[in-house]
Image: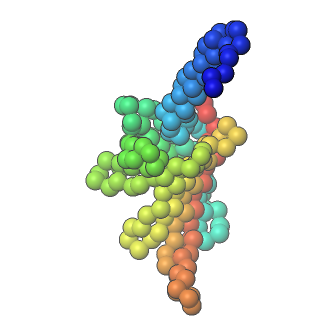
Amino acid sequence: MPQILKPGWIGKARRMVRICFLLILLQGISLNSYSQEYLPDKMTGTWNGFLQIWSNGQKKDSVQVKLTILRIEKESWQWRMEYLSDKAPMVKDYRLKVKDREKNIFITDEGDGVELEDYTFGNKMYSLFETQDYWLTSTQELRNGKLIFEVTAGKKSGVLDKGVTNYSVTSMQRAVLSRQ
C-alpha cells in the first residue's frame, strides 16, 4: 500500500542531497590534499646547527652544518649538507626521489651510483643499510619545529641463542637543526 508523502518533503530531500554532496566534496578535497603532502615538503628550507660526532660513547668532535632541502621536480628534492669545518669542509649533495608513493618509500641518490631506500612514518624518515660489514641507520625527524638528523654505525657483534643476532653501535652523528 503506497504511503502518502507529507508536503515539503521534496525540498527537504534536495537540502539533504546538497549537504551530502558538500560533505563528500569536502572530504575528497581534504583527503586529496593530505595524500599530496610528503614529509620532504614539510622539511624544505635551510637548516643550521651543529653536528655532534661520537665514538664508543665519547664525544669526539662537533662541526657546524647547513642543510638545504629544495623541491626540484614533482617527486624529487635536493638534499644538500654543508659541513662548515675549518679543518675539513665538505659538501654532500644528494637527491631524494619517490620510489613508491602509496608506501611512502623514497630513494636517496648519492650521485655515484649508490641509492639508499628511505621509509617515512609520520614526521620521521628511516634508512637502514649495510656497507663494508657496517650496519648504518639514518633518521631525520621533524619535532617541535626542529629537524633532528642522526646516523649510527656498528658491526655484527654476535649471535645469541634462539636465533637473535646482536649488532654494536660504535659511532653516532647527531644534529638538532633550526630552520633559518
Q: Which residue: 43% across, 64% down?
A: 129
Q: Is residue 161 visible?
A: yes
Q: Residue at x 51, y 61 (%)?
A: 137
Judge whether residue 63 can be spotted in this image. no
Q: Residue 113, position in %: x, y? A: 28, 53
Q: Quadrant of residue 48?
A: top right
| Residue 179 at x, y percent in the picture | 61, 34
Identify whether 99 is placed above or below 57.
above
Is 22 left or right of 96, judged from the image as shown?
A: right
At x 42% / y 43%, what residue is drawn?
Answer: 101
Q: Position of residue 54 (x, y in %)?
A: 60, 63
**Residue nearest the viewer, comparing 5 with 179:** 5
Image-based side of 122 in relation to 109, left or right: right
Rendered position, 84 above or below 32: below
Judge left or right: residue 32 versus residue 113.
Answer: right
Q: In the rendered image of this protein, does residue 42 appear above or below residue 158?
A: above
* Residue at image point 49% right, 75% down: 155
Residue 52 versus residue 74 in the image, above or below: below
Query: Which quadrant holds the C terminus?
Result: top right
Report the front residue among 23 and 59: 23
